[in-house]
Amino acid sequence: MNWIDRRRQQRRRRRMLRALSVAPGALVALFLIGALLPAEYLFTSQAKLQRPPETVWRVLIDVDGMPLWRSDLTAVERLPDLGGNPAWREVGKSGDQVVELTLAEAPRRLVMQRPGLGAPGLPMRTVELAATTQGTLVTVTDRIASRNPFRRVLVRLHLPQPPVLRLLRDLTERLSVNRREVVTLPGA
């Protein structure tokens, strides 16, 4: 091995050592940033749908029909009421979760939560419907709490994609199926 090859090999070793020394520092920095962030987080998103609020409401409260339009669900199983509120188990790609319908003000507001997790009443999803001249403005808010500092950083960076966005995309796709479009012919 000549002196040029030795120098290249030494340079590679130094680069690898630098990379290995930076990785723990980055993890410590992420942990400290996450520890300083509040445990509770709100994520809100909106979509405008060209359907009346009553139609959107019927789709949202149809528990048995959810696996047909929600891409994150494979099955839904109805459960006995929890404290007088309807409850069901959602089976999906990310596992099973029990959901309780805590408030339903037809056709304006829907509040769901997963009972018995983390802070009291969290995580919670609120869906608000507002009638507009073109249809309905749907506002979905997820309120979550996380004890894990790394997860707090990831949630604020929107990694992975927030479930609110997926729900609104699926709802938009569901309500745009079988729409009848009125076409005006020229000269009519």
Image: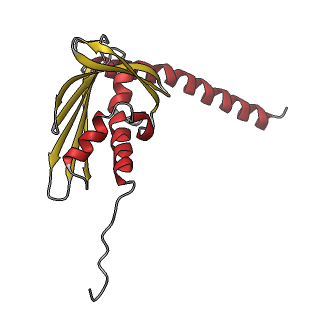
Q: Residue at x 47, y 25 (%)?
A: 94
Apparent side of residue 99 relative to residue 2 in the rendered image (left or right): left
Q: Quadrant of the N terminus?
A: top right
Residue 150 position by quadrant: top left
Question: Residue 53 at x, y = what percent?
Answer: 20, 46
Q: Is residue 39 visible?
A: no
- Residue reaching furthest bottom? 187
- Residue 90 in the image: x percent, y percent? 41, 24
Q: Nearer the viewer, residue 38 or 85?
A: 85
* Residue 145, x across and y down, in percent: 28, 19
Q: Is residue 62 something that shows in the picture?
A: yes
Which of 130 and 88 lies nearest the eye of the viewer? 88
Residue 94, above or below 162: above
For the C terminus, the image quarter is bottom left
Farthest right residue in view? 1
Which residue does the image show at 27% across and 20% down from the upper left? Answer: 86
